[in-house]
Image (cartoon, grey):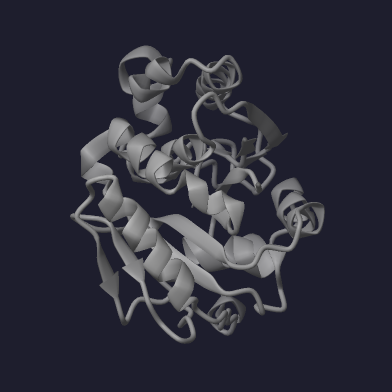
Amino acid sequence: MMPSLFVSHGAPTLPLDDCPARAFISGLGKDLPRPKAILAVSAHWDTGTPAVNRVPVNDTIHDFFGFPDALYRLRYPAPGSAELTTRTISALQHAGFSTQGDNDRGLDHGAWVPLLLMYPEHDIPVVQLSIQSRLGPAHHLQLGRAISRLRNDYLILCTGSFTHNLRMLDRSGLNAPEAPWARDFSAWIHAALVEGRTDDLVNYRRLAPFAVQAHPDDDHFMPLFVAVGAGGDGASARRLHSSTTFGTLRMDAYAFS
């Protein structure tokens, strides 16, 4: 059974940036057994109820503006998987979620940026599942638990950001010194993950230091809770990577199994 993964996808320019996070993600696919297919859960597809894409080949969605032209030329035309779409919808409906298929949605940059680094040949089928950020952490924990058995056959890759406050980025450079609030928030979350304090994690906005600075909005943090839930009951957390870009954008990654 493969672990569920949470990976911070960082800025859209990650494939072009020379930083530790890019090096880590580029090697991550080689450290895992080759999956039959991948279920991607990205912070950048946010819907009212869970949706699962169902396409023969995924379009590459360039859902960002003002970046270098080279970034818009990147493509990730991974095939879809009707089997994985059907099994994901079935698992969610069995758990009581109202779920629908989407015949048009491709892969947003939260999904294709890390996948481009992990599996550049784009020959592994990919299906994407949406988040519902307004419903909060407990909802996403249950969403993950509903799909946890898919790990018998598939890789569950959840992508967002360990901290995500674009207004507080240090524009002086990719390798700017880390802000103390980003360090303290991340240390608290790490301790809660490895100690299995799931209830504290669900209540991170009330309990974690600098939670508002780290996540003015919930969207980029919700994939972490899907990954925790998909790890299964009593899953242990293992940190795979920790670094910071632009002073405040933490790039941490975890495996749950």
- Answer whether residue 131 is visible to the viewer in this image: no
For residue 213, what is the image quadrant?
Answer: top left
Position of residue 235 measured from the top left corner of the image (x, y, whole percent): 57, 28
Position of residue 97 measured from the top left corner of the image (x, y, whole percent): 23, 49
Q: Is residue 253 rendered to the left or right of residue 89?
A: right
Residue at coordinates 33% horizontally, 33% vertically from top-left? 137
Of 146 and 116, which appears nearest the observer?
146
Residue at coordinates 79% horizontally, 56% vertically from top-left? 27
Q: Is residue 124 rendered to the left or right of residue 139?
A: right
Position of residue 203 measured from the top left corner of the image (x, y, whole percent): 33, 19
Position of residue 172 measured from the top left corner of the image (x, y, whole percent): 60, 45
Q: Is residue 32 rendered to the left or right of residue 122?
A: right
257 above or below 39?
above
Question: Count of labels shown?
Answer: 0
Residue at coordinates 33% horizontally, 61% vertically from top-left? 89
Of 241 and 128, which appears nearest the observer?
128
